[in-house]
Image (cartoon, rainbow, N blue to C red):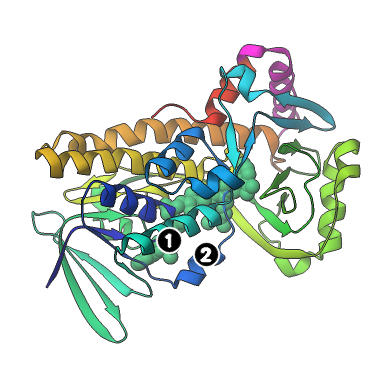
Amino acid sequence: MRRHQVAIIGAGPSGLLLGALLHKAGIDAVILERRSRDHVLSRIRAGVLEMGTVGLLHQAGVGARLEREGLVHEGFSLNFNGHGLRIDLADLTGGKTVTVYGQTEVTRDLMVHRDEIGAATIHEADDVGLEGFDGDAPRVSYTKDGQRHEIACDFIAGCDGFHGVSRASVPERALSTFERVYPFGWLGVLADVPPCSHELIYAGHDRGFALCSMRSLTRSRYYIQCSLEDRVENWSDQAFWDELRRRLDPAAAEAVVTGPSIEKSIAPLRSFVAEPLRFGRLFLVGDAAHIVPPTGAKGLNLAVGDVHYLSEALIEFFAEGSRAGIDDYSRRALMRIWQAERFSWSLTTLLHRFDTMTAFERRMQEAEFAYLAGSRNMRAGLAENYVGLPY
Ligand code: FAS
Ligand code: PHB
């Protein structure tokens, strides 16, 4: 039976970054991924990286292209029924910024790095199974090309996302979950057109939320809040552009350059946390452990925070035989997870239209926005969460 020190389930950003950091510390980790490499790269997801994420990618040895092509942003705008408010991140946080660089590119850079270091990733690994993680001899099994394989390991990192097998392998009685499913989704469009603004615009409007983002100076990413009953095929490109413009202030609407969509998809929004994140020799990481509505640009960044804590803990274990880090992983990660959950939930509640909202709750949204506009302290609180709380 093959043996690796760590078996990582999932070759998304969490699994790939964990693998890179462990390799750098001389720890042998194999990654088992259900889908093909191309399928993983076909996903269009996050677009904003916290400084901590940028730092960890550099530490892992995959920061060169990010350095060249990433767009450093010192602020973004909130727009509330046509009233604009710039959140000056750099001024409010003593110089911190975010970097616009698509998750697809982060994943690509990590995959290329893994090829270069010759580390094992088994793609199209079917029916992954996790056994023995409540003891001292965990094993993972999988089917590849019709053959069943088994791997012995010291630890298993469940980096397999919300619908993965890792969290599902934990006995229900051992897990507590906390969830809020939002009564709307985001319809996202990717198009090779220049962004309507040099910074992101988050727009709250009576018709619904809209977000103007980008992937580069020639590729834009836009979202509009949509109903959960909506289907992508119900939205022509023209219908999307028209609705986006209705939700923006006149200047931004005017600046929108339209063009054919190269990707169009609807994502549901939920807040979710599983506790704890450790079960013997199995650890849950990233979307396998938590989900946030993308309003606060926290999903990918929160996954990276988990990887930071777990990589430190495993490196300490293998280098010094200390269990302190792995024993404290769940507590440390959950402290930061719940803060990101709060921030993402609060920004989602502020900026989205809820059909069930009473007139009083609508006034609360307006009062919250007015307080933000009038209080530097309130804006500083929003800014420190957006750039990322410290690890
Ligand atoms: P991922 O889900 O990215 O990766 C898990 C990997 O495990 C996948 O490759 C999957 O194929 C694999 N896997 C699953 N089950 C398996 C099994 N049984 N065996 C082996 N492998 C298995 N975040 C933001 O910050 N901003 C956004 O705008 C944003 N938009 C999003 C849109 C969508 C539709 C989704 C689903 C998420 C979005 N997110 C966004 C969040 C997203 O970026 C995640 O936080 C990020 O992908 C987390 O990375 P991972 O934890 O690696 O999980
Ligand atoms: C994106 O560019 O996909 C993006 C940016 C910021 C968010 C969510 C998504 O809050």
Going by the numbered disc 2, the residue's amino acid type is Leu
Boundaries of the magenta span: 358-377
Residue at numbered disc 2: 41
Of 207 and 145, which appears nearest the observer? 145
Mark 2 or mark 1: name the one nearer the start of the chain.
Answer: 2
Residue 36 falls left or right of residue 166: right
Q: Is mark 2 within 8 Å of ligand 1?
A: no
Give the label on residue 111, or none. Answer: 1
Could you tell me if the residues under marks 2 and 1 are in contact, i.e. CB atoms within 8 Å?
yes
Q: Residue at x 89, y 36 (%)?
A: 251
Element type where label 1 sits in the image? helix
Going by the numbered disc 1, the residue's amino acid type is Met
Q: Residue at x 58, y 29 (%)?
A: 97
Image quadrant containing the C terminus: top left
Q: CA distance from mark 2 to mark 1?
A: 9 Å
Seen in the picture, residue 76 relative to 379 is either above or below; the reply is below
